Image: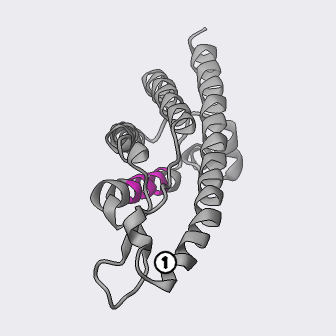
Amino acid sequence: MSTATAAGSSGKAVASDPDRILPVNVFADICGIVMLIILLDGFPDRIGVIRNAHKPGSYLPLLSPEFRAYIPLLNFWWGIALALALVHLHNGRWTNQTRLFDVMLRLLAAVILFRLLTIGPIVGPPPSWAFQGSLSGIYFIRMNERMVPTLNLSIKVFLFFLFVAKLVGIYVHYRRLFRRTA
């Protein structure tokens, strides 16, 4: 193989070398993880709906207390994933150690995702005080009855597909890990 192909100037070199990591993909992972950490850790109370822009008390938070209890665990998962992404960015290649670490990280992610699938709603209904005293409260009650279950179902379906992807990733990386050591 020529040095140009080994350096990755050809698309065939990337496909034929399963240990090579593209920095663009790692950078995109890092950006996604950082955005999730900032959003859910820094502003969990800001995720919601503003009923009336002229009334400061008309803000309705959407994240349920059951989901908020999992934010530290999600931060732990994302922190470890961020560390692994930085190692990948530094090395540029998979090693046996990073594959094993990735399998364990995917297993942790699968457990967390399974737990999120089995808890109550992720998006909770706004508190009852939010609907008192105005005609717009009736509108929000009806919107809440339709929107919250649909939003929860959509999030749970997304989490299910992410869970399945993590299980497939465990299988793929586990096979590659033992194919290399055998």
* SS at circle 1: helix
Q: Residue 70, image x and y in percent?
A: 38, 40
Residue 142 location, quadrant: bottom right
Residue 39 location, quadrant: bottom left
**Can you say whether 116 is above or below 35 in the image?**
above
- Graded by Cα atoms within 10 Å as few (under 14), some (14 to 19) or many (20 or more), the crowding at tag 1 reads some
98 vs 133, nearest the viewer = 133
In the image, 176: left or right of 111? right
Which residue is at 51% across, 30% downward? 106
Q: Residue 113, image x and y in percent?
A: 53, 36
Q: How is the image coloured?
A: one colour
Which residue is at 53% across, 74% downward? 140
From which residue to which does the magenta span run? 26-36
**Can you say whether 89 is above or below 9 in the image?**
above
Q: Is residue 85 visible?
A: yes
Image quadrant where one finds the N terminus:
top right
Q: Residue 147, image x and y in percent?
A: 61, 65
| Magenta highlight on residue 28 | yes
Image quadrant where one finds the C terminus:
top right
Which residue is at 65% across, 51% downward? 153
From the image, give the main secondary structure of the stretch colored magenta.
helix
Q: Is residue 17 visible?
A: no
| Magenta highlight on residue 6 | no
Circle 1 sits on which residue?
137
129 vs 5, nearest the viewer = 129
